[in-house]
Image (tube, grey):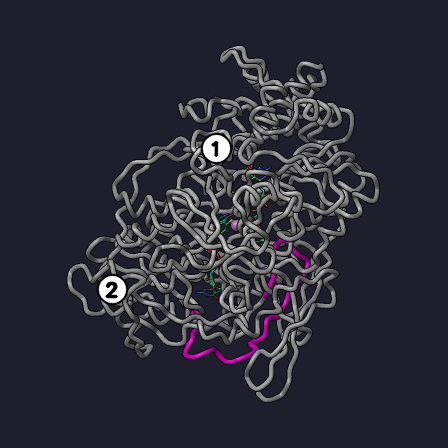
Amino acid sequence: MSERITKVTTSHWGAFEVTTENGRIVGTGPFREDPRPPPIAGVLPAAIHHRTRVTRPSVREGWLKGGKERNRDGRGQDRFIELPWDEALDIAGAELERVRSEHGNGAIFGGSYGWASAGRFHHALGQVHRFLNAIGGYVPSVASYSTAGAQAIIPHVFGMNFLKLTWGHQNSWPMIAEHTETLVMFGGINPKNAQVSMGGVTRHRTLDWLRRYLDSGMRLVNVGPQRTDTIDGAEWLPVIPGTDTALMLAMAHVLETENLVDREFLSRCTVGYDRFRDYLLGVGDGQPKTPSWAAGLCGIEAERIRALARGMASTRTLITVAWSLQRGQNGEQPYWMAAVLAAMLGQIGLPGGGVGYGYGAIGGVGVPLKRLQGLALPQGENPVKDSIPVARVADMLLRPGGPYDFNGQRKIYPDIRLVYWCGGNPFHHHQDLHRLEQAWKKPDTIIVHEPWWTATAKRADIVFPATTPYEREDIGRSPNDAFIFHMAKLIEPVGEARDDYQIFSQLAARLGAGTVFTEGRDASDWQRHLYEQFLQNAASEGIEIPPLDDLKEKNWVELPIEGPEHVTVPFASFRANPEADPLDTPSGRIEIYSDRIAGFGYDETPGHPAWREPDEWLGSPDVDKHPLHLVSPQPGDKLHSQLESALADVADARPMPIIMNPADAARRSISDGDPVIVFNDRGRCRARASVSGDIMKHVVAISTGAWFDPGVDLIDQQGNPNVLTRDIGTSRIGQGCTAHTTLVDVVRD
Ligand SMILES: Nc1nc2c(c(=O)[nH]1)N[C@H]1C(S)=C(S)[C@@H](COP(=O)(O)OP(=O)(O)OC[C@H]3O[C@@H](n4cnc5c(=O)[nH]c(N)nc54)[C@H](O)[C@@H]3O)O[C@H]1N2
Ligand SMILES: Nc1nc2c(c(=O)[nH]1)N[C@H]1C(S)=C(S)[C@@H](COP(=O)(O)OP(=O)(O)OC[C@H]3O[C@@H](n4cnc5c(=O)[nH]c(N)nc54)[C@H](O)[C@@H]3O)O[C@H]1N2
Ligand SMILES: [Mo]
């Protein structure tokens, strides 16, 4: 292996070259087909061989010693004992057997949320779910931290799954270029976030599209707390976080009272406008949702709201909404309200008009592409019928048997004895991490597969060292991208790391489910099998895919599946004839009023979109104590918490920067670069002040991604915003993550 070899591989942030020498990754470089290759891979050589890699199977000492409680409080404190693979697998197998025979498979939680790595076969979540199904089932989680609120509300409004809408019923970038005159972007459209997509995005073009729009004279309006949420040159409308629904209502009020509403469209293609209009005009509650009313909530002057609404009514307008807006309390509302606003403008179904969600949130949204399915490991059947909303994991552990509401259903939390995590980092991604630590003490056993000693691995009982994609062979492809990659094995596994597939095969054999899990195939048999199926499936759609051996030789190919011919104008046929092509809502129309939602009887969500004050926002009484609103967006230099250990080594890189407005900094005698402590009643973290006029007053931002690292004083040392965020659901409809609904204060450290 002393030869110097360079190959192309792919990742969630796209394709890149990797150079190896003497069995190590020594460098990375851009992929030549990518016009704007992200620099994220640069840290890979340091990260892959980092001292924080898990090198041997490890079992927590207090758990290994046994005893009834197995010293559950010792999670995160005890030392780990390294064991040979066979011994550790025997121990884990016996514990899984004990739990399933004593408590049933419904006592195993394998939600295991997380992004893991790209690569179709070795996708960690596909592996763990197939394994747990093979041994009799488990409690899964539904939806995602990214879009749980949207996934709950969009089917009520548009009668389709949110992912189907995202990938099949939105304007494409070229369509927007051709037709849109006004692009109103709630939460911005940020090329920084579009670097990333599940399974990879190969050609990064979001920035170039936005530049082209600006150059062509399109009006771009960024409605959000940070100017940097889109490209330089866009208009910036700083909105108080959590108040977008109030702002949209006021825009709707202008349309209604100035007779700018497309009533013909509303009557043909929607239901319930009359009841919504009563609310808009204040018929029931005595409060018309006027621009002056909204100005007092969202911080944007009434005249500016009026002017924007008029401008939208007189031009071809596309309203886009970032996923971040639904990652807050009642995050379903701005999603619903944006649809209502677009319906009032009457441009849904016209090219370049209407509403769209998640542009720029991840790469691939808006790319005109023929979507090919396949290349996924079959998951088997789960005999356990229970599940939880993904972001309610701490509630589940803390309240076994406790009731909760979810999208019209009354449900009961299961009693979990064993937690299995493979491919995610809850001590990065979950809210209110001190609360999660309490919840984490509840199960008997926690098993984690990880390449690195993350905060989650450190808090497990049994840790199996997993390979990274560079240590195994795979096929790389995303259904939202035209490229397909052979991902060669580039180096030997680090330490004694094994592939998740190998670990699960060996565990399944111990649990009498070896053949059910493997079907007699090894990893390379599976890859060939899945690839064959994909190839045939594509052929039936008229797309020719080279045989696997050709792909291996070529390293990558681009499939002829991208181009404007692959997309139609969203909702055009519905608009043309809603009788003949109805939506799959109860009424067949866009539901401005939903009888179904009204029937749930949730006061936070009447039958139409409505403004509800969040518990924490800049208008709440708590501002006396915690006067700053914290937003915690995605990091630009990496994917979530991945590669973090190597990034954190760079001098002065940690704790994380906190972006704050000069006025807020001055009031606290904080200068750019100063160490600070960010706090509220839930927790405290260190950070480094980054003073900038690009963030509005009274709002601060810390990107996610630092590894949770509470010191003896319980102050998180690295700057993980999730020691501060709130762990409540968006609403009873979506029960999603509400990270963006958080008040804090900042002092000099
Ligand atoms: N405050 C706040 N919190 C948030 C958000 C926010 O906006 N604000 N956003 C939320 C969102 S949208 C998301 S998606 C989550 C992301 O949260 P996660 O998806 O949990 O974050 P990752 O860091 O990607 O975690 C993936 C883990 O898988 C490991 N891994 C990688 N490859 C493999 C493999 O092959 N096998 C195994 N076994 N493990 C592997 C990585 O080392 C890493 O630890 O964070 C959420 N948290
Ligand atoms: N480089 C990189 N890209 C990523 C990821 C990554 O880890 N790294 N993660 C990916 C994942 S998993 C996801 S889910 C997506 C997330 O995509 P998004 O959810 O769209 O992105 P965020 O970065 O969470 O937030 C975008 C901006 O929303 C603004 N914002 C926050 N609250 C409000 C509000 O109430 N109103 C308005 N108008 N604006 C608000 C903030 O200023 C923030 O910068 O990003 C993906 N892209
Ligand atoms: Mo996400």
**Mark 1 or 2, nearer chain start:** 2
What residue is drawn where x is 58% and y is 78%? 25
SS at badge 1: loop
Q: Is residue 584 visible?
A: no
The image's mark for residue 95 is 2
**Camera sees residue 505:** yes
Q: Secondary structure at mark 2?
A: helix
Task: Answer whether labels 1 and 2 touch (C-beta < 8 Å).
Answer: no
Magenta stretch, residue numbers = 476-501
Residue in front for this viewpoint, 741 or 683: 683
* Residue type beneath disc 1: Asn
From this viewpoint, which residue is outermost toward the right?
A: 216
Q: Is residue 148 above or below residue 33?
A: above
As measured in the structure, the alpha-carbon distance from the residue carrying label 1 to the one carrying label 2 is: 40 Å
Residue 396 at what x, y percent from top left?
32, 45
Amino acid type assigned to the residue bearing label 2 in the image: Glu
Quadrant housing the N terminus:
bottom right
Tell me the residue that label 1 is attached to: 330
Near mark 1 (Cα within 10 A), the count class, few <14, some 14-19 or many ≥20, is many
Residue 605 shown left or right of residue 64 in the figure? right
Q: Is residue 434 left or right of residue 301?
A: left
- Residue 305: image x %, image y %? 67, 25
